[in-house]
Image (cartoon, rainbow, N blue to C red):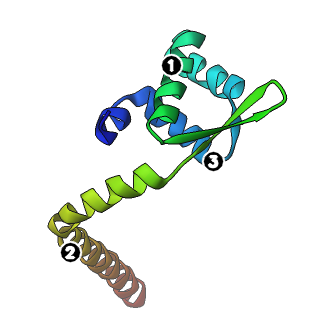
Amino acid sequence: MHAFDILGDPVRRRILELIHAGEMSSGAVTEVIRAEFAISQPAVSQHLKVLRDNGFATVRTEGTRRLYSVDTTPLREVDRWLDTFRRNWTPHLDALTTEIARGKRARRNTATHKESTS
């Protein structure tokens, strides 16, 4: 499966968000995902399997619990691919940042001018 096929699913993206925050048991992941997406426990397990089988998640067994965490390797590959496109939007974002700063400065100057003339 291609990385974007994996990341294209909102349930899998949410699982990655959860386990990125820290190692979580499959039961804890299932509880959150079932509440948010109203899907069955076997469906959540299947999503965890897809993430694990495609290298996005690692699992560690502790007694009877399975603890999941993110493996960032495939995410770094996605980031490298996206890097080829960043040059298209970075200058626009930099220009936006400049314009926002100009607007804030202009509002401060206007407010300061009004206070000094009052």
Disc number at residue 56?
none
Residue 74 position, x and y percent, is 41, 50
Q: Amino acid at mark 1?
A: Gln
Q: From the viewer's perspective, is residue 81 above or below residue 88?
A: above
Q: Secondary structure at mark 2?
A: helix
Measure the C-alpha gap from mark 3 to mark 1.
Answer: 21 Å
Residue beneath label 3, please? Answer: 21
In the picture shown, does residue 61 fall above or below 69? above
Secondary structure category for the residue under label 1: helix
Who's the residue at 34% across and 75% down the image?
104
Q: Residue lying furthest left in this view?
A: 88
Q: How many neighbours does mark 2 have within 10 angstroms: few (below 14), some (14-19), or many (20 or more)?
A: few
Q: Seen from this angle, which residue lies furthest bottom? A: 116
Q: Quadrant of the N terminus?
A: top left
Dot 3, how many residues are within 10 Å of its Cα: few (below 14), some (14-19), or many (20+)?
A: few
Say which quadrant the C terminus sits in.
bottom left
Residue 28 in the image: x percent, y percent? 70, 27
Outermost right residue: 63
User: Which numbered disc, 2 or 3, marks the residue that appears first in the sequence?
Assistant: 3
Q: Which residue is mark 1?
A: 46
- Mark number, residue 95: 2
